[in-house]
Amino acid sequence: MSFETKDFFNYPQYLSKKFLETSEDVNTKDKSSFETHNLECGYYTVTFCPETENYCLGMVDMVDSTKISATLGNDRMSRYYQIFLNSMSKILNKFDGKVVKNIGDCLLYYFPVCKIKNPEDYLIKSLECSFAMIESHDFICQYLKKETLPCLDYRISMDYGNVTLMKSSDSASIDMIGTPINMCAKINRKASTNGIVVGGDIREMLKKVHRYEFEEIDGYSIGLKLDYPIYVVRRNGIFF
């Protein structure tokens, strides 16, 4: 491997209570602190980048969030989501991942390819980020308990492939479209609670990496003759 494996395989500093501490994230009620938007009617347009790129993408989605949030008031529900999304984002940042967008209780992210050119190393780093998210579960729940909020669970799905960058007229953020994004959303529920599933392309590229073992589960039909294979990942004898 071309990078220092200790940076990605031994990361207790990413899983500490101090690292995941979110108390500095002020949950303000002052609407003036948020950017106001012009709500007048206008045309919505999108612009696509003429070039495409292969990326590893991931999606982390809370489990039973609708049921749980129904028992919380608006303020406590907002704080509940805030702790989850900010904790995931902090871990993602340590692995050079980038948030594409959040959709309620779901965070879509990707890993830029500029820092690691070797595809195998790139995917290892991306996958280790998802393991770090899973292994942070107990720390996050401890923090939620301090704020008298219920523990939360989540699922992670990952896929790799060609995507196109796009930008809309009403946002400064970059968005993406492509099969890997759709697949992450489709296969997420195939993951066990606090577990990870990956698409067949990731498994194919990492099947010779001895640190991981892949167990195939039910594939996902994409309308072709063969289903797209989906795998759970094992590391150190534990399935996630």
Image (cartoon, rainbow, N blue to C red):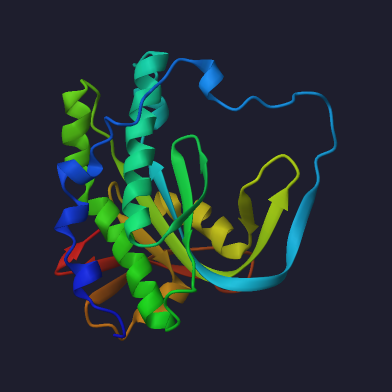
Q: Quadrant of the C terminus?
A: bottom left
State whether residue 196 is above or below residue 77: below
State whether residue 51 is above or below residue 80: below
State whether residue 97 is above or below residue 213: above
Residue 97 on image: x %, y %: 42, 59
Residue in the image at 33% along x and 48% along y: 90
Q: Is residue 227 visible?
A: no
Q: Is residue 70 visible?
A: yes
Most foreground residue, 81 or 20 = 20
State whether residue 121 is above or below residue 92: below
Residue 161 on image: x %, y %: 55, 71
Residue in the image at 24% along x and 26% along y: 150
Q: To which quarter of the image does residue 44 belong? A: top right
Most foreground residue, 188 or 110 = 110
Q: To which quarter of the image does residue 169 belong? A: top right
Q: Quadrant of the N terminus?
A: bottom left
Residue 28 on image: x %, y %: 42, 19
How many marks do you count on the picture? 0
Residue 140 on image: x %, y %: 22, 39
Residue 195 shown left or right of residue 30 in the figure: left
Residue in the image at 15% along x and 69% along y: 236
Residue 68 shown left or right of residue 158 in the figure: left
